[in-house]
Image: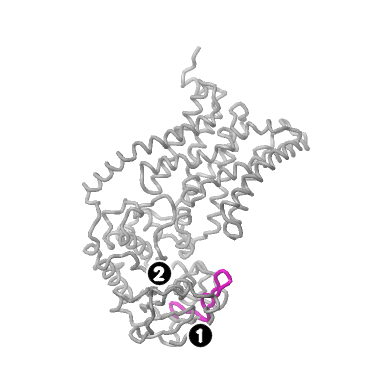
């Protein structure tokens, strides 16, 4: 018997993954918008790799204390490792002794190497990391759901609540400093919410692909809308559709959800590129209709306003 | 400026090193409230570095910078600054609209929220002639329009000190005149304006004080017509490092 989409959405086994998928869709592009703005699109990838070391350390500690199941501390370990990694990379970036790409590369290699070595020490094998590398619906627990909800709320409160300040800091750091904004603290905050998002998403999408869900929807949104706020909102809509769509699709076809979700975001990106000329033509027509074309500037410069 | 009047800007024995090389040496400068001052000098003379130290974004190796009697390192004092950096295009890769960009000017110490539809944003956009361009990405604007967005961003918080680094660069001549008129009016109304320029250009009328830098030192501070001549296109940063410390006699 074929199950209907509604039966799927309300089924016991899919309920937790679907809720987490929506949360990932909402949060990943918020963080991704700031990372794209800062030209740090690969930070999420680096943090995903570091999170693997955290997963392995969680296993190791779990083995020491005979935790059951053995990976009980894997997600908390990933959370701690990725937050520490995020703060370290931000400090390295600011101090400037190492270039950004070298610092990210060290994070990549150190994270994956630490993961495979420590998981071996914990009595597992590389196979134990597969669910975290590529995502796995079968392993989602109620604890994962609670952690995901808490992390998502933090990311959304910070990422949307402080959006003006974070946008200013990521868009024009010098102006932000001259304005008296706490630039260093905000940069660290962005890195930390990126780490939280990586931890939130690695159960479903996998550490290797989480960065794609942060960045690709933003790139797709940029093709069809202008402005920072609109880009963020559109990217969130795209990512929610892709996360949900990917999960539903993999319920009918035996495919890995993380890969399908990422491929869907890429399909949106390609679609955005295709319709971009049409959107631009329509936007140009609209601007012309409202007198929004290029103006002769000087006759408009006010001579009477209170500011000037 | 009277003895007891607190200067808008007070710089004492300022030294700045960049990459181990001295860029500014012993620079001292007072700017009175409401004064319109031009900072002039050839490329590499240190004028932009001086300006950046003035607004607290450049770390200094010696001396002190005070704004309105408070050290510039205190973030709170920066709420009174309007700053237009050099090459004032935002560096982020997501093109923001003119409205979004101007709205960021309302942020400051303890002010982490601003509304895109704030009436001050609309007013400033209208003042600089960009009301109809509010939803247009800044990156798609001409150099002159972009510069006006950045000036609106600096002015939207009604600063007491306006600091601009080459605001006429990439701007057509007629817009330069209009922007210069804005600076003159602001100074007349009591706003202190410090502006880095290659040449006085459209500000020839209005600036009564020119501070000229050469290789990191102040070589003239007084009426612009008495300033030493220099080649504005000359690049002192290209000189051998051992030349940087030499005394300049105008």
The C terminus of chain B sits in image quarter: bottom left
The magenta stretch is B6-26
- Residues A308 and A212: in front is A212
From the image, state whether disc 1 or disc 2 is nearer to you.
1
In this view, the residue farthest toward the front is B240
Q: In this figure, which residue is indicated by the disc labeled 1?
A: B247
The rendered magenta stretch, by its main secondary structure, is classed as strand
Q: How is the image coloured?
A: one colour
Residue A246, image x, y percentages: 49, 28
**Is disc 2 placed on a helix, strand or loop?**
strand
Chain at tag 1: B
Taking A119 as reference, is B134 above or below it? Answer: below
How packed mark 1 is, by other alpha carbons closer than 10 Å (few <14, some 14-19, many 20 or more), is few
Left or right of A217, for residue A288:
left
Q: From this viewpoint, is residue B34 visible? A: no
Residue B42, image x, y percentages: 41, 76
Picture disc at residue B165: 2
| Among numbered discs 1 and 2, the one appearing first in the sequence | 2
Residue A272, image x, y percentages: 38, 37
């Amino acid at each position: 018997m074929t199950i209907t989409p509604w039966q799927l959405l309300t089924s016991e086994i899919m309920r937790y993954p679907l809720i987490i998928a929506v949360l990932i869709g909402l949060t990943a592009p918020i963080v991704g918008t700031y990372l794209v703005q800062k030209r740090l699109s690969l930070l999420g990838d680096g943090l995903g790799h570091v999170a693997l070391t955290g997963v392995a350390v969680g296993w190791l500690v779990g083995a020491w204390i005979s935790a059951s199941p053995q990976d009980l501390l894997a997600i908390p370990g990933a959370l701690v490792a990725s937050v520490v990694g995020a703060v370290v990379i931000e400090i390295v970036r600011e101090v400037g002794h190492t270039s950004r790409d070298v610092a990210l590369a060290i994070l990549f290699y150190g994270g994956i190497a630490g993961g495979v070595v420590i998981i071996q020490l914990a009595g597992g094998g590389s196979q134990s990391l597969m669910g975290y590398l590529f995502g796995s619906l079968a392993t989602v627990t109620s604890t994962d759901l609670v952690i995901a909800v808490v992390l998502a709320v933090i990311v959304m409160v910070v990422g949307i609540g402080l959006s003006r300040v974070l946008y200013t800091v990521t868009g024009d750091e010098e102006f932000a400093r001259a304005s008296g904004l706490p630039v260093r603290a905000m940069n660290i905050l962005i890195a930390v919410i990126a780490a939280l998002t990586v931890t939130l998403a690695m159960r479903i999408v996998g550490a290797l692909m989480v960065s794609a869900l942060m960045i690709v929807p933003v790139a797709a949104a940029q093709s069809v809308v202008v402005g920072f706020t609109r880009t963020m909102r559109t990217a969130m809509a795209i990512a929610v559709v892709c996360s949900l769509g990917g999960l539903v699709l993999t319920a009918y076809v035996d495919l890995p959800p993380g890969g399908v979700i990422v491929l869907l975001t890429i399909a949106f990106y390609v679609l955005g590129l295709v319709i971009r000329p049409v959107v631009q033509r329509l936007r140009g027509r609209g601007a012309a209709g409202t007198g929004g074309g290029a103006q002769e500037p000087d006759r408009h410069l006010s001579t009477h306003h209170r500011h000037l | 400026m009277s003895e007891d009047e607190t200067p808008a800007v007070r710089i004492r024995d300022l030294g700045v090193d960049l990459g181990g090389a001295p860029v500014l040496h012993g620079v001292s400068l007072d700017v009175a409230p409401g004064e319109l001052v031009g900072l002039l000098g050839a490329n590499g003379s240190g004028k932009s570095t001086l300006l950046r130290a003035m607004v607290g974004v450049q770390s200094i190796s010696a001396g002190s910078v005070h704004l309105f009697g408070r050290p510039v390192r205190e973030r709170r004092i920066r709420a009174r600054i309007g700053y237009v950096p050099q090459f004032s295009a935002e560096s982020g890769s997501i093109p923001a609209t003119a409205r979004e960009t101007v709205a960021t000017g309302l942020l400051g110490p303890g002010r982490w929220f601003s509304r895109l539809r704030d009436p001050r944003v609309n007013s400033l956009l209208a003042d600089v002639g960009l009301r109809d361009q509010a939803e247009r990405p800044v990156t798609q604007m001409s150099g002159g329009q972009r510069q006006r967005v950045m000036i609106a961003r600096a002015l939207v918080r009604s600063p007491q000190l306006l600091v601009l680094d080459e605001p006429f660069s990439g701007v057509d001549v007629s817009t330069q005149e209009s922007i210069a008129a804005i600076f003159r009016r602001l100074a007349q109304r009591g706003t202190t304006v410090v502006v880095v320029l290659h040449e006085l250009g459209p500000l020839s009328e209005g600036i009564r004080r020119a501070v000229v830098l050469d290789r990191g030192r102040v070589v003239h501070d007084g009426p612009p017509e008495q300033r030493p001549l220099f080649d504005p296109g000359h690049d002192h940063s290209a000189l051998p490092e051992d030349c940087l410390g030499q005394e300049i006699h105008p």
